[in-house]
Image (tube, helix red, strand yellow):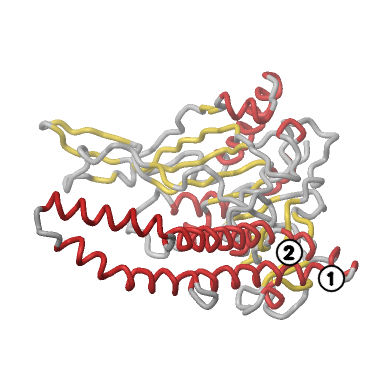
Amino acid sequence: MGTFGQIMIIRRSLFPIFVFATLAACLSAQTVYLTKQPGAWKPWKLTAIASARAERGVLPAELKAFEAKLIELSEFLRRTPGIGQPIGFSVETWGNLAGYRPVPGQPLGKQLPLSGATTFGAFPIFEYQRNGKTIREDTGETNLLQFVVNDLQSIYRSRPVEWEQIETDAVLMPAVQGTVAGYPLVLGNVIVKKNAKPLTVPFSLEQALKLVLPNRQQAFEMARDNLAKEQASFAEWQTPAKRAERKKGYQEASVSMKDGGAFAKQMEGQESQIEAVMRASVAPAGPLAKSALEAEAALKEVQTLLAALSPAEGTGPSCYNVNGKSLRERFRPVGATGCVPLVRPNWNYFDARLPRSAPQLIVISGYGECLKASEDAPGKTWGCVANRKLVEGLDWAAVVGWLDH
């Protein structure tokens, strides 16, 4: 699986990448950014909502210890040259306890280390005029860096389209795009770990194909049932009783319209056309039957593939080729050309001997956005400028030494 059979994902972290304040009424053409004014580090705060505490099964002492570790991480950031004594911006750092809702096959929240993040924001210092007075602010909008702790699913990555709406933590393994201070850069996220265990494990071909079954089974049953329903409706439509009922309805409508029977005559004349359309719709070669046959064939395709797997193929690692035309060409044994490995989180990565509050993994998210900021405004010191300075000047040895304790 390569050196980074470690990186996995499933869903994007719920933390925001941008923070927006209600400054629209305040900011105007008179806004002046004070790029040479000293800023401040604002007081630390922690968010640990009730649902997150319940999902994690966290004890008060554990939460207190976890917050202490997040504060320690914040202090590493503060010691970075050019960040601890900010010029032209003020810094806010805050922590949070992340919630956790497992999908089938995942451990319960109380069985895992606590997870959350220390978030870093460098906010501009600026002045503007309001009612003839000069107002100074150091908040608003900025790019954030998040130092996400102990979250195996904090890097977003796509899944096969055949798994739409299926509950699983299996994903397409993201590629390593480079390194930052020697640590892998994956989808704009820096992955920092000390444990030699990989962050992901292979997903077997049999498991991968079985996740295709529910959607195809449902599609077939819906198409089959819809065809049967429409066929039954058409059969009833043709009965003498229903024909008489419709004729009576046409006549009553004509009487209410006082049209001398014109409407009734018109509708009775169209009965044969309506019947022809309905007959064609439910015919063996019609669109509804065709949809049912196609759905049945799609279901049989995956059933046939599963039945044909040898034990070695079924239990072996799988990959996915998005350009494959058939299911057989898309879901392949790992190593096939143009095929991205399918993996899931390695829940055995975490060392259960350590306290739940111990940080064992950091994912620095938001950094990729700042790599795109190639044309920062002249004199700008906040946002991505500060974020890059932080990551480039961070005491990585201290951060790595902080892990796994």
Residue at (82%, 52%) from the top-left corner? Answer: 197
Dot 2, crowdedness within 10 Å: few (<14), some or many (≥20)?
many
- Residue 284 % position (x, y): 55, 75
Q: Quadrant of residue 176?
A: bottom right
- Residue 262 % position (x, y): 14, 63
Q: Quadrant of residue 139?
A: top left
Residue 6 visible in the displayed image: yes
Q: Which residue is mark 1?
A: 309
Q: Nearer the viewer, residue 201 or 375?
A: 201
Disc 1, SS:
loop
Q: Nearer the viewer, residue 282 or 398?
A: 282
Viewed as shown, does residue 289 lie left or right of 19? right
Residue type, mark 1 in image? Leu
Q: Nearer the viewer, residue 209 or 59?
A: 209
Q: Which residue is mark 2?
A: 209
Earlier-in-chain disc, 2 versus 1:
2
Residue type, mark 2 in image? Leu
Disc 2 + disc 1, Cβ < 8 Å: yes
Q: Quadrant of the N terminus?
A: bottom right
Disc 2, SS:
helix
